[in-house]
Amino acid sequence: MLRLGPGDDAAILRLGQRSEAVVTVDLLTDGVDFRLSEIDPRRAGRKALAVSLSDIAAMAARPTAAVVAVALPEQNGRELGEQLFLGMLPLAEQFGVAIAGGDTNSWAAPLVISVTVIGEVAGEEPLCRSGARPGDKIVVTGDFGGSILGKHLDFTPRVDESLLLSQRYRLHGGMDVSDGLSLDLSRMATASGVGACVELDAVPVSRAARELAARANDGSSALEHALGDGEDFELLMAVPPDDAQRMIAEQPLDVSLTIVGEFVDEQGLWQLDSQGNRQTLAPRGYEHRLD
Ligand SMILES: [Mg+2]
């Protein structure tokens, strides 16, 4: 039975009386999600598993197994397939994920790889996008922007972090930031039927975002990169104020936790500048092109 369907980071299936499975799938393509001409193929294999693990983390679930489907290019396909698998293995081991099977095809076209990860709900309730309430603080892990410089391939999915946080604190809602902080935040606010107000000065801007912004002809500020670049794969959470303050004081993770604003009654996405002026903030991020 389907307990939670499309619209969240993963689906939840009720199996029998007691058990529930969390299921997510991602599909990556050479030329869109990575460029095999520029990187070690093992990093592409690793990324293909990591993005699905990030969606499991978004639900505060524990990953169990993965199944992998690949369409390999005919030329050097066998060698590529092996390298992809070798890239996936260390990450699977790190998170106790069994690679349970899959399917291998070949075709006269670039690599397509799809990883399905199955997990279990760890606590009483999964973490959903729809749970944010007005007054909740917006809490994020890590920093944002410029992941194209390397993090989009080598990030650590926040599986352990979300399990620990959901055990130790009350979390009303959450998701992983895959398409851009402002875009994903607006999606979470919409799913929750609330608004979100971002304190611009509080947004953790990554070194890579600053590096990109400093390049000639870039045309965006480091903050704009942090708000709009895709593939940060950090956690975005709605946390009741007292738990948020405790979280920030305790900093229980290896990665930093930051309050970047709060969820508000008035629907929409808002920004608060250092003078306390509130304006609308246009959500920006990565969206797949479709005609
Ligand atoms: Mg996601």
Image: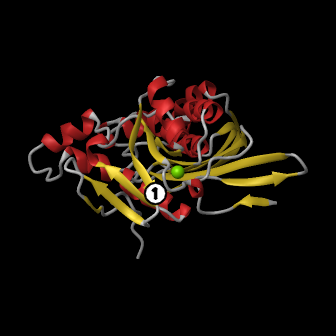
198 left or right of 112 in image: left
Q: Quadrant of residue 201?
A: top left
What residue occupies the far right of the structure in this picture?
17
SS at circle 1: loop
Q: Is residue 45 visible?
A: no
Q: Position of residue 265 (x, y in %)?
A: 46, 63
Label 1 beta carbon less than 8 Å to ligand 1: no
Q: Position of residue 132 (x, y in %)?
A: 54, 54
Q: Position of residue 73 (x, y in %)?
A: 49, 50
Dot 1: few (<14), some (14–19), or many (≥20) neighbours within 10 Å? few
Quadrant containing the C terminus is bottom left
99 left or right of 256 in image: right
Between residues 137 and 37, which one lies in front from this camera angle?
Answer: 137
Quadrant containing the N terminus is bottom right
Q: Which residue is mark 1?
A: 109
Residue name at image x 63 percent, y 52 percent: 10
Q: How many marks?
A: 1
Between residues 64 and 16, which one lies in front from this camera angle?
Answer: 16
| Amino acid identity at mark 1 | Ala
